[in-house]
């Protein structure tokens, strides 16, 4: 690996020092890193490892393309291997990053002209925040499925009326129940583009619902986390 | 010097290119039983079984070729670099990205320099066009790496990000390979459908390759089922492009595909197959199927069987799912018992043979242009345009010649069946 030493927070092309940790819920947090020369397209993900560790995991980028820092949103998975270690990290620790990877997201021209419905479960909201912050004028509705209100990560940032929270374990959201229940009640314009992100079961169910409403699979783009 | 190669077509191509490199530098190729001075083992790590095979080939090579320089390269060299470097029976461990410069390393070693593989340049495309006489068919590498991150796959970790070889370089390599006398070229890479050089996508590159002058035909090595448009189908009208695709379905269940992080569904796959067969009715599709992926239910497996019947794959590369350390699938829940995986894989194999027999039978009475790959006891064997194995009698038959052959009957009723024919031209 190449040593650059041109940035005190970035010792190596792939090593980044943690600048900030935001605790969003009891088990979800975001990590901010210096962006430096790291270029990506909103919607892409990185692979992240702890320097000195032997495993890495993929994380969607949570920040916009033009922001000063690179941010990721992480939920600690109970009995998970990597996230409990990540959660214990303190500011100043080094992370190893590779990427960016993936084709999730859209070209600028499409983002500025299209009509989008973003469907996310849990931390699957991450790439959509990056997209929305990158293209502030994008025409979107963001449907976010979580268990409880506290998982509505940074929801105050989204324009009123564009963010729909579905809470399955309490009645605190805009819709009480799974996001797929809400999706069944919706009607969308025929030329809508759908972007789905999160766990594979939610994505499968949502795909079935959208196909059932007559949308073509080519209008639907998916990013599976697990 | 001797070579041992494990794994995929890309590895085979890279070995062929290295053989060419070493031969041009004056090294003599021998079997590794004949006490070579150098042995290069080009390893594979795609499954645990490949690791096992690679390891045993390395120890065998080191044992048989005592005092030889043992170079280990390939995907296992990336995946287990430090471990291999600590082994005393290995002289050099060379990562994939530096594989194309192994000659420089070996030359340096023999001229007494202190050489280290990490000093070699990194270039995944710096391979010589393959010299004739090695095979009848030559691969040309257009792309390397993959960043799809399918949950079962270790390849992104060992081959790295997707990178594409510049168009001009590819065309130059095709020209040289044709000049070297090859009549069939296989377009190879890790995920070739993702080819992208500026505005040139995979289809565009293929169109340019087909326009290279010369008497040769083109095959495409395995392809992921997403990422190409309708123009792709039209390209197959070109007489140089052979009517066969190895299109990797992996599962006939949309749920399983999502758990594998494969972002197409069976309907999209169906659309592709239908588009092709609407134009080229006897188009040959072969595929890869992973059986017993974590969480695969009876119903999901049943959907795979249905898909195999519907798409009429003439051959299925069946992989019984095995945990690959370091992949996401390793951490998925509901891993299936070995017995279930074995039973399911046997069912797929049976179906694959049935399909193959039906497909081969449908060619009886038709003709194929067969490129002769082997001649033994007056019998020539090779593959027709659709990648069907064909044998025929011909006195004075020569390797690398193309003959028009009428197909008369099928021989064998198992995986290794073939068609027997007679030369008409
Ligand atoms: C392209 C991509 C982008 C991703 N982006 C994000 C992201 O932005 N934020 C994020 O938190 N995660 C994201 N993930 C998931 C992440 O890579 C890890 O899988 C996750 O952090 C769990 O790691 P672990 O080692 O703790 O769990 P492991 O020990 O690897 O897994 C334990 C179990 O937890 C399940 N699991 C994995 N992820 C989750 C989850 N988020 N919630 C509940 N169960 C889970 C696994 O299927 C497994 O059964 C992404 C995955 C992919 C493929």
Image: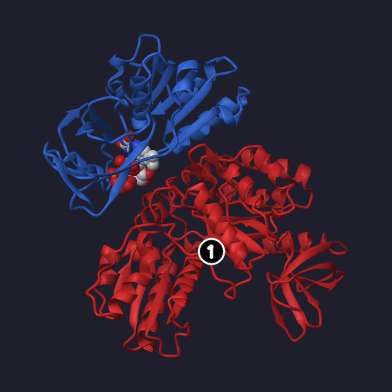
Chain colours: A blue, B red
Q: Residue at x 59, y 65 (%)?
A: B138
Q: Residue at x 30, y 77 (%)?
A: B90
Horizontal arrangement in the rendering, residue B256 relative to residue B93 (left or right): right
Q: Position of residue A75 (x, y in %)?
A: 28, 35
Image quarter for ligand 1 equals top left
Which residue is farthest top? A160
Q: Is residue A224 above or below residue B177?
A: above
Q: Position of residue B251 (x, y in %)?
A: 57, 49
Which of B146 and B168 lies nearest the eye of the viewer?
A: B168
Q: Position of residue B143 (x, y in %)?
A: 48, 52
Q: Residue at x 34, y 85 (%)?
A: B68
Which of B150 and B128 lies nearest the eye of the viewer?
A: B128
The chain carrying label 1 is B
Q: Quadrant of the C terminus of chain A?
A: top left
Residue B291 visible from this viewpoint? no
Q: Is residue B390 above or below residue A56?
A: below
Q: Position of residue A188 (x, y in %)?
A: 55, 15
Horizontal arrangement in the rendering, residue B107 relative to residue B181 (left or right): left
Q: Is residue A144 above or below residue B398?
A: above
How many numbered callouts?
Answer: 1
Which of B112 and B344 lies nearest the eye of the viewer?
A: B112
Q: Is mark 1 within 8 Å of ligand 1?
A: no
Specify the quadrant of the image occupied by residue B140. Answer: bottom right
Residue A188 visible from this viewpoint? yes
Q: Which residue is mark 1?
A: B9
- Callout 1 environment at 10 Å: few (<14), some (14 to 19), or many (20+)? some
Q: Residue at x 53, y 67 (%)?
A: B130
Specify the quadrant of the image occupied by residue B425. Answer: bottom right
Q: Secondary structure at mark 1?
A: helix
């Amino acid at each position: 690996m190449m040593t650059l030493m041109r940035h005190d927070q970035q010792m190596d092309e792939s090593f980044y020092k943690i600048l900030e940790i935001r605790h969003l819920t009891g088990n979800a947090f975001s990590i901010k890193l210096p962006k430096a020369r790291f270029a990506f397209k909103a919607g892409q993900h990185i692979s992240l490892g702890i320097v000195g560790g032997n495993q890495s995991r993929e994380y969607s980028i949570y920040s916009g393309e033009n922001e000063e820092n690179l941010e990721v949103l992480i939920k600690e998975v109970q009995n998970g291997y990597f996230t409990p270690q990540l959660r214990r990290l303190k500011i100043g620790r080094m992370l190893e990053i590779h990427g960016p990877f993936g084709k999730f997201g859209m070209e600028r021209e499409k983002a500025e002209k299209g009509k989008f419905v973003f469907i996310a479960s849990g931390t699957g909201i991450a790439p959509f925040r990056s997209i929305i912050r990158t293209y502030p004028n994008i025409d979107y509705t963001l449907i976010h499925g979580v268990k409880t209100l506290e998982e509505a990560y940074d929801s105050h940032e989204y324009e009123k009326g564009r963010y729909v929270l579905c809470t399955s374990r309490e009645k605190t959201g805009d819709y009480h129940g799974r996001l797929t229940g809400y999706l069944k009640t919706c009607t969308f314009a025929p030329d809508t583009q759908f972007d789905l992100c999160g766990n594979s079961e939610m994505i499968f169910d949502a795909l079935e619902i959208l196909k059932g409403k007559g949308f073509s699979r080519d209008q639907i783009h998916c990013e599976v986390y697990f | 010097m001797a070579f041992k190669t494990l794994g995929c077509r890309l590895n085979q191509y890279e070995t062929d290119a290295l053989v060419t490199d070493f031969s041009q530098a004056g090294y003599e190729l021998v079997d590794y039983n004949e006490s070579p001075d150098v042995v290069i083992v080009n390893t594979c790590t795609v499954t645990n079984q490949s690791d096992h095979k690679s390891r045993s080939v390395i120890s065998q090579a080191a044992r048989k070729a005592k005092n030889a320089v043992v170079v280990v390269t390939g995907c296992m060299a990336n995946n287990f670099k430090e471990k291999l470097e600590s082994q005393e029976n290995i002289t050099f461990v060379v990562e994939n990205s530096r594989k194309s410069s192994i000659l420089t390393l070996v030359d340096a070693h023999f001229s007494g320099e202190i050489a280290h593989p990490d000093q070699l340049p990194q270039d995944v495309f710096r391979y010589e066009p393959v010299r004739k006489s090695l095979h009848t068919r030559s691969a040309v590498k257009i792309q390397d790496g993959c960043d799809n991150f399918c949950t079962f796959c270790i390849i992104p970790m060992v081959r790295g990000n997707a990178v594409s070889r510049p168009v001009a370089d590819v065309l130059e390599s095709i020209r040289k390979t044709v000049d070297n006398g090859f009549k069939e070229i296989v377009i190879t890479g890790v995920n070739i459908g993702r080819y992208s050089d500026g505005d040139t996508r995979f289809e565009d590159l293929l169109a340019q390759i087909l326009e290279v002058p010369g008497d040769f035909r083109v095959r495409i090595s395995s392809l992921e089922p997403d990422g190409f448009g309708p123009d792709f189908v039209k390209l197959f009208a070109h007489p140089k492009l052979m009517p066969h695709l190895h299109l990797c379905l992996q599962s006939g269940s949309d749920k399983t595909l999502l758990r594998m992080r494969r972002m197409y569904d069976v309907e999209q796959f169906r659309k592709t197959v239908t588009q092709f067969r609407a134009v080229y009715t006897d188009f040959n599709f072969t595929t890869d199927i992973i059986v017993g992926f974590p969480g695969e239910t009876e119903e999901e497996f049943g959907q795979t069987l249905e898909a195999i019947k519907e798409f009429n794959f003439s051959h299925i590369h069946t992989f019984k799912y095995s945990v690959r350390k370091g992949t996401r699938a390793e951490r998925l829940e509901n891993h299936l018992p070995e017995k279930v995986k074995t039973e399911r894989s046997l069912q797929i194999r049976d179906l694959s043979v049935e399909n193959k027999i039906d497909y081969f039978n449908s060619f009886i009475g038709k003709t194929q242009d067969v490129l002769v790959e082997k001649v033994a006891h007056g019998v020539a064997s090779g593959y027709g345009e659709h990648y069907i194995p064909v044998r025929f009698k011909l006195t004075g038959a020569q390797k690398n010649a193309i003959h028009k052959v009428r197909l008369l009957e099928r021989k064998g009723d198992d995986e290794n069946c073939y068609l027997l024919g007679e030369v008409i031209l």
